[in-house]
Amino acid sequence: MSQVSQSDLATLEQSRIALHNASANPEIAPALAQVGYDEAKLQEGKALFATAQDAFDANTEHNLNATLAYQSFDQKRKALEV
């Protein structure tokens, strides 16, 4: 995995944990609500997170498929050179 995708993966994981903790921890949720991050806003964040996670997963799959396709092409090219 590349450096950028590792960073993206780490950001997604931190976001997932933050959203989970904000909803699950009874001490955090009221403090966040006081500054405008009520349950509706947290649900909005969870929806955005899900969209980002889906995009990351699709991009990862696309990159894997591209790598596999190139490897197949390269093997066939090398076979023709012999």
Image (cartoon, grey):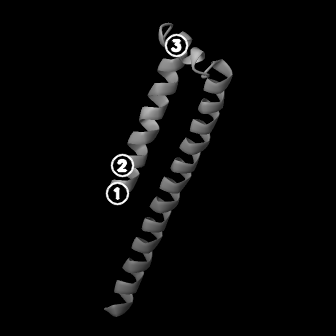
Q: Is residue 1 visible?
A: no
The residue under label 1 is which amino acid type?
Ser
Q: Is mark 3 on a helix, strand or loop?
A: helix
Mark 1 neighbour class, 10 Å CA radius: few under 14, some 14 to 19, many 20 or more = few
Task: Specify which label sits upstream in the sequence, 3 or 2.
Answer: 2
Asked if the residue at tag 2 contacts the one at tag 1, i.e. Cβ–Cβ closer than 8 Å, the answer is yes
Q: Residues within 10 Å of mark 2 (few under 14, many from 20)?
A: few
Q: Where is residue 34 in the image (x, y as percent from the top left)?
A: 58, 15
At x 61%, y 38%, the residue is: 48
* Crowd rating for badge 3 (residues with CA inside 10 Å; few <14, some 14–19, many 20+): few
Depth check, mark 1 against mark 3: the one in front is 3
Vertical position of residue 11 compared to residue 71: above or below: above
Mark 1 → mark 2, Cα distance in angstroms: 6 Å
Q: In which quarter of the image is the N terminus?
A: bottom left
Q: Do the residues labelled 1 and 3 touch (CB within 8 Å)?
A: no
Q: Residue at x 38, y 41 (%)?
A: 10
N-terminal-most mark, 1 or 3: 1
Q: What element carries label 1?
A: loop
Residue 61, can we see it?
yes
Q: Residue under circle 3?
A: 31
Cα gap from disc 3 to disc 2, whole angstroms: 31 Å
Residue 13: where, in percent of width, then height?
A: 43, 35
Which is nearer the eye, 37 or 53? 37
- Where's residue 46, x and y in %? 60, 30
Front in this rendered view, residue 30 or 69: 30
Question: On residue 2, which mark appears?
Answer: 1
Q: Tell me which amino acid carries mark 2.
A: Gln
Q: Point out the image quarter for the C terminus.
A: bottom left
Find the distance from the CA under tag 1 to the CA under tag 3. 37 Å
Q: Which residue type does callout 3 highlight? A: Ala
Task: Please determine whether, in this image, residue 60 is positioned above or below residue 11.
Answer: below
SS for dot 2: helix
